[in-house]
Image: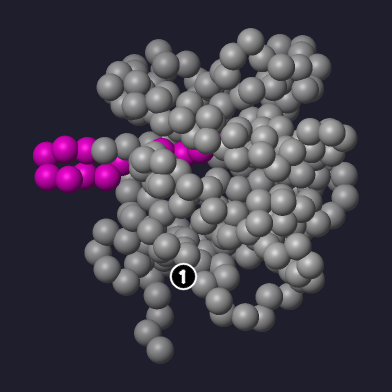
């Protein structure tokens, strides 16, 4: 069997060259990391759950006309995506204060914000992905003003979609992070939602109890991460209600 070309290995995913030019394959690992990889573990089944959940969100976004890099899920851990150039920014949308915003501004976690707030971090692990302003982004040429208008609009559309989907299953979308890709079409470029959307990159709280159903369960040692993600997947109908929790996935599809 021919060996695939690995393009990049990150903390939670591996990117391979796709079968056709202009495509890549995203492989979801079981590895969980936090605090810039200072905390690490392997959570069996996490990659399978994130692959499924990411498919669910990306398909929904594509269907409502928010362009994403997602083409199709290939198997339990892999999805076929359009290859794109990643804008070196983490785009964070917050509906309620939590995490670094709570620390930075002294806001109690869970405080509702007056409106969704979009923040940008420069993607650089060695610097800990520092928060940057639009001034930095323009001055260093990471994105143009037109790009920033498009990125803001994409981020808010993703927020409306995800908030609604989560609200429908009794979950509050506290915040999330997305990444943006550029694809070129002749002389034109288009910005699309890339990377992943999953409980690894969102904060999700049960509406009634406030129980955390996202990566904070791992970051803060609050219980079993795979159980939390399985709860999200089950509520969304991505996993059948009575299915056995994913421990050791053996199926290909
Ligand atoms: P915070 O800035 O409070 O740490 O994170 C805000 C939101 O963005 C959270 O939902 C968090 O999960 C997500 N986020 C921030 N940085 C990263 C990152 O490097 N990787 C992932 N997967 N999510 C991130």
| Quarter of the image where one finds residue 115 | top right
Residues rendered magenta in the picture? 177-189
Q: Nearer the viewer, residue 226 or 243?
A: 243
View extreme (left): residue:
187
Is there any visible trace of residue 85 in the rendered image? yes
Q: Is residue 56 left or right of residue 134?
A: right
Instruction: Give the residue at mark 1.
Output: 74
Magenta span: chief secondary structure: strand
The residue drawn where x is 66% and y is 39% is 168
The residue drawn where x is 49% and y is 34% is 158
| Quarter of the image where one finds residue 194 | top left
Q: Is residue 22 above or below residue 136?
A: below
CA neighbours of label 1 inside 10 A, class few (<14), some (14 to 19), many (20+): some
Mark 1 lies on a secondary structure that is loop
View extreme (front): residue:
168
Quadrant (top left, top right, bottom left, bottom right) of the N terminus: bottom left
Q: Position of residue 53 (x, y in %)?
A: 60, 54
Q: Nearer the viewer, residue 80 or 205?
A: 205
Q: Is residue 209 above or below residue 10?
A: above
Is there any visible trace of residue 40 in the rendered image? no
Quadrant (top left, top right, bottom left, bottom right) of the C terminus: bottom right
Q: Is residue 76 left or right of residue 225?
A: left
Q: Nearer the viewer, residue 252 or 207?
A: 207
The residue drawn where x is 34% and y is 55% is 82
Q: Position of residue 60 (x, y in %)?
A: 48, 47
The residue drawn where x is 57% and y is 70% is 76
Disc 1 under 8 Å from ligand 1? The reply is no
């Amino acid at each position: 069997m021919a060996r695939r070309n690995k393009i990049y290995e990150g903390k939670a995913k591996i990117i391979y060259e796709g079968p056709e030019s202009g495509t890549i394959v995203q492989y979801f690992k079981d590895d969980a990391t936090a605090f810039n990889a200072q905390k690490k573990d392997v959570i069996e089944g996490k990659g399978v759950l994130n692959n499924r959940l990411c498919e669910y969100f990306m398909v929904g976004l594509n269907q409502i006309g928010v362009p994403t890099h997602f083409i199709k899920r290939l198997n339990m851990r892999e999805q076929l995506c359009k290859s794109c150039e990643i804008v070196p920014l983490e785009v964070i949308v917050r509906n309620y204060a939590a995490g670094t915003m709570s620390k930075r501004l002294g806001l109690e976690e869970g405080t509702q914000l007056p409106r969704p707030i979009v923040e940008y971090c420069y993607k650089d692990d060695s610097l800990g992905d520092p928060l940057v302003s639009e001034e930095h982004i323009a001055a260093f040429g990471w994105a143009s003003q037109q790009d920033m208008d498009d990125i803001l609009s994409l981020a808010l559309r993703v927020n409306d979609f995800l908030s609604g989907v989560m609200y429908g299953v009794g979950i509050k979308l506290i915040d999330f992070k997305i990444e943006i890709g550029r694809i070129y079409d002749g002389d034109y470029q288009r910005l699309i939602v890339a990377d992943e959307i999953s409980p690894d990159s969102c904060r999700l709280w049960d509406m009634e109890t406030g129980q955390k159903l996202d990566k904070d369960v791992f970051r803060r040692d609050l219980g079993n991460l795979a159980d939390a993600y399985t709860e999200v997947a089950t509520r969304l109908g991505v996993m059948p209600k009575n299915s056995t929790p994913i421990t050791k996935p053996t199926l290909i599809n």
